[in-house]
Amino acid sequence: DFRWEILVESATTVTEVLRRGCGTDKRSIACALVKRGIPFRIILSKSFRTSAAPHEQRNEHWNTPSKLHMGLGWRMPGFVGNSYEYLVYEQCSESFLRCEEHAYAALSAGGILWRITRQYLEDDIILDGPRGSLRHQQDIYVNGHCYVEDILSPHEQDLICGVYKVLNGIHCLSSHIVIRVLIMGFFRRLWWS
């Protein structure tokens, strides 16, 4: 049996698992959820987590990009992507997904992260459960018990999705927020129209 647990945040998901006959064991349920792109979380009781090495301390800067996978970077005003930029994005995204232990967490995220990640990772990698470093985990409390789960930082999510940050000449931070909202709004219009 697996040491990890499945956590879903929607009663609809539980109903769907029961109605589709996904099974009653963790393996069958996790595979069915990944196959359909339904968001869920894989959590591990903190008592099963081996103690962290001294150099593996969680810090307040967990969402800063790693040196190996810095993201796709900043572009000047008027930037228009081309086939070369897309090729670089694909290589960076694939490198991150195949090299980082906690990248599998994108499979359980659902949505666009799930869809892109399935191009590079096998579905059953989710069955290994949380295995990333402490730096890439967060604590979750359920019914008074402490669990950990592997997570992706906002920078890592942006890297997988191909987000470029474009300067607008006003202020870098506001430019990042405006660009991000425009990208998300674009996906919503495509999805719901």
Image (cartoon, rainbow, N blue to C red):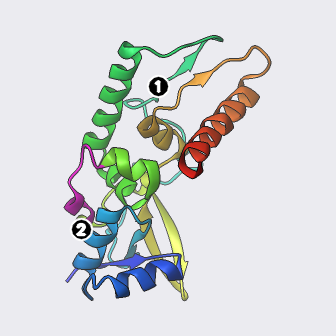
Is 119 part of what is drawn in magenta? yes
Is 154 part of what is drawn in magenta? no
179 or 52: nearer the viewer: 179
Q: Which residue is mark 1?
A: 72
Q: Residue at x 50, y 47 (%)?
A: 153
Q: Residue at x 72, y 26 (%)?
A: 175
Q: Quadrant of residue 148?
A: bottom left
Q: Position of residue 34 (x, y in %)?
A: 32, 64
Q: Does any portion of residue 56 appear in the rendered image? A: no
Q: Quadrant of residue 160?
A: top left
Circle 1 sits in a helix, a strand or a loop, which is it? loop
Task: Tell me where the magenta segment starts and ends, as one range.
Answer: 118-127
Q: Earlier in the sequence, mark 2 or mark 1?
A: 1
Q: Position of residue 109 (x, y in %)?
A: 44, 58
Q: Position of residue 74 (x, y in %)?
A: 57, 19
Q: Is residue 139 left or right of residue 107?
A: right
